[in-house]
Every structure is written in structure tokens, then in C-alpha cells.
Image: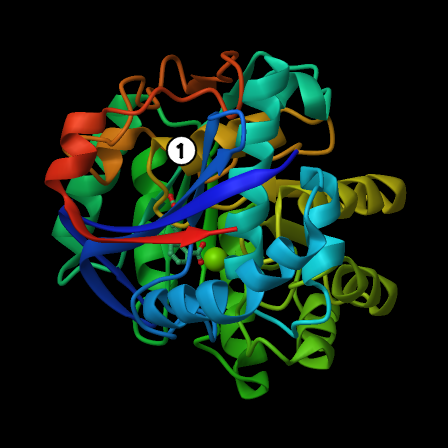
Amino acid sequence: MKLAQLELRRIHLELVTPFRTSFGEQTAREILLIGATTDDGIVGWGECVAMSEPLYSPEFVSGVETVISEFLTPRLTQHGEFSAADVAHILKPIKGHQMAKAALEMAALDAELRSQEINLHTRFGGSRASVPSGVSVGIFASIDALLTAVQGYVDDGYARIKLKVEPGWDIEPVRLVRDLIGPDMGLQVDANTAYTRQDIDHLRQLDEYDLLLIEQPLDTDDLLGHRDLAQAIETPVCLDESIESFTQAEDAIAIGAAEIINIKPGRVGGYLEAVRIHDLCAAHGIPVWCGGMLETGIGRAANCALAALDGFVLPGDISASRRFYSRDIVQNPIEVVGGEVAVPSAPGLGYDLDVDFLESITTSVHHLSL
Ligand code: OSB
Ligand code: MG
């Protein structure tokens, strides 16, 4: 494949309801999209999962735009012809910037698959035509507001509930949500690094509520802390922020710090690295699930193809488009039916852009020639 042009397009989407996590509250999502046009005129899109501020990980939207235009794109240009599978290798000399790299690889992958008239699900070889859908529920100002929101998601048919937690908003919300949804529905929590090694005894109280897992309780770089916690509590410890590559996944598994892994393609540098981590985890008997970053229909479509692989044994954060957005930038937004989301099957990542709406929410466009 030879790329002729890249388009860096920033969009602004309001959230239907504020989303509060231990690292902050969001009321809107600013997203960088990358359009890649081949010299045959085929266009593929990548969605960068970086957020506006470096609160979840070090990357952020304007930084990503800079690193792509100043450092990553010139490397692709120098290389000339390449396939999507070469992108990670070509960009490897640039340190870090996993989300920026992932978005470029994703755009190249979409363009390549569209030119081959193949869909991502087929390329990955997943056996399932639909995947179970979990929903991520933010921190609320009151327990009543939380329970009302959770009841709404139960009524929507979600296959499992994930509660965002932080010190002061953990044991009690979990107890009451468990009471509300009953003993059989999947329930898990995500702390986004809000606890420390001193909180092990506190977190052991969660063992009573039969959680599927506790996600990223400790700092991103605290692998030994996660290992100690995993040994001290029954609730399985799952890593999100800590896993940015195949090697980090290997290390975390080897020392017992990751009993489960949340795979986010953007966080690990791309969908192809995500598949490799999936294979690694499957070989070690480590369950995985597909995380989410409030993606639009572009990113969610690709996440479905990934989550269709056999090792994804837990429901992913692949909620319906309308969980976060009143209108999506695709014409085939993700919908939850009977707790499941259908894996798209059209060529490329499988979405169909809503060009008019996309234009209306675009805040800037920059073109780069290759
Ligand atoms: O930690 O999984 C997380 C959203 C933004 C940043 C980090 C996380 C999340 C979610 C959202 O939990 C899940 C979703 O996209 O549905
Ligand atoms: Mg998380």
C-alpha cells in the first residue's frame, strides 16, 4: 500500500451525561481522527483514543497531533510503500506514544482492508458473530443517582456492570448495586489507579460481593503492589493502565500481577499488538476483555472484531453508541440487543461514516502529504 495523504481531523462530541472517574469528570469528548488516503484513492480512518488531558495516560489530543505530524508521518513517508502490519515496526524508533501510533496503524489497516474488500473480523479470524456488551458506570453525586443509572442499564440489557470507584466511593456503592442487580449478574470495579499499597486491607472488603475483577487499583508503574494485592485478596486483579506492550504483559503475568488483562488497542500501540497480547494471555490461561475509551462507531467497530477472538472470555466495555452519544459519526452505530453487540462485517473496520454530521462537529482539519 502507498499512502498519498493523511488528514488529521479533530471533532467535539457532547456526552449524553457527565462521566466521572477517579481521575476527573468529562462532559464532552474531543477526538482526533486520522484519515488515510491511498494512492488509489481509498480512504481508511483511525480513531485516536487519547483524551484532552493526560489524566489517564501521558498522551493527550494536541500532543498526539504534534507527534503524528512532526515525527510519525515523516517516518512513513521515508518508508514509501508498506502494509498495515509494517507500521508498528516503522514507527518503533520513536519512543512511547502508543495511542498516536495505534491510530495511524488503524487508519492504514482500514484503508488496506477496504482495498482488499475484507473485513477486520475476517482478518482477525474470530469465531463469534456477536460479543457480550458491558457498560462502564461513572461515579455519581449520590447513591440514589447511581442506582437509578444502573437500573437503566440493566433495563437496556447489558451483560455486566462496571462501577468506577475511588476512596470514599467503593464498598457501599458495590454493596448496594450488588443488592439491586442480584447475585447472578456480572459486576466489576475500576479504580483507575486511585488506591495505594496501604489500601490492601480496605480493598479486601470487596471480596464479599463476588466481583468479576478489580481493575487497576494501584499506580500504573506499581506491578509489585498489584502482585501483593492479588495474593492478599480473592477478587481477581485486572490491569489496564499498567499494560502498554506485549513485554509488559509478559512481565506482569510472570510475576503474578495480572490475573486478568483489559486489552485496549490504543494503549498498547495498535490492534495488531492487541492480538499478540491476546494470544500470549490465551497461552498462559489469563482471561482478557476489550476495554473502551468512549470511542465513536469507528473505534467500537474495530473493538468488536477484536473482542470476537476466543480468548476474550469476559464482556468488554463495548456499550451502545447511545450510552455516551446522542448521535454517532457513523450510520451504523453500535446497538445492544439481548446483551450482545453484532460484530460488523462490511469491508474495512465495518463502519459507514455519517459525513454530514462529522463535518458539523469538526473543529479543525490538517492535511499532510506523504
Ligand atoms: O479505565 O477503562 C477505563 C474511559 C476513559 C478512560 C479510561 C477508561 C474508560 C472507561 C470507559 O471505563 C469505557 C467505555 O468506553 O465504555
Ligand atoms: Mg480502566
Q: How many marks?
A: 1
Q: Is residue 207 visible?
A: no
- Quick one: 360 or 5, which is closer to the camera? 5
The residue sitting at the bottom extreme is: 198
Image point (59%, 12%), residue name: 117
Task: Left or right? Give the position of 137 relative to 279.
Answer: left
Q: Residue at x 49, y 12 (%)?
A: 346
In the image, is residue 202 above or below residue 264?
Answer: below
Vertical side of 258 occupied by 370: above or below: above
From the top left corner, tell me how far across and down residue 37 is, in percent. Answer: 47, 35
User: Which residue bears the numbered disc 1?
Assistant: 298
Q: Nearer the viewer, residue 272 or 261?
A: 272
The answer to whether 154 appears left or right of 208 in the picture is left
Give the percent coordinates (x, y) of residue 266. Answer: 54, 53
Q: Is residue 117 visible?
A: yes
313, above or below 53, in the image: above
- Disc 1, SS: helix
**220 or 302: nearer the eye?**
302
Q: Is residue 13 left or right of residue 189?
A: left
The N terminus - image quarter: top right
Q: Say how the picture is coloured.
A: rainbow
Question: In the image, is residue 141 above or below residue 153?
Answer: below
Residue under the point 62% across and 72% down: 96
> What amino acid type is highlighted by mark number 1?
Ile
- Give residue 305's position: percent from left, percent from top: 58, 26
Query: Percent from the top left, x then y, of residue 279?
Result: 81, 40
The residue depicted at 52 percent of the width and 12 percent of the height is 345
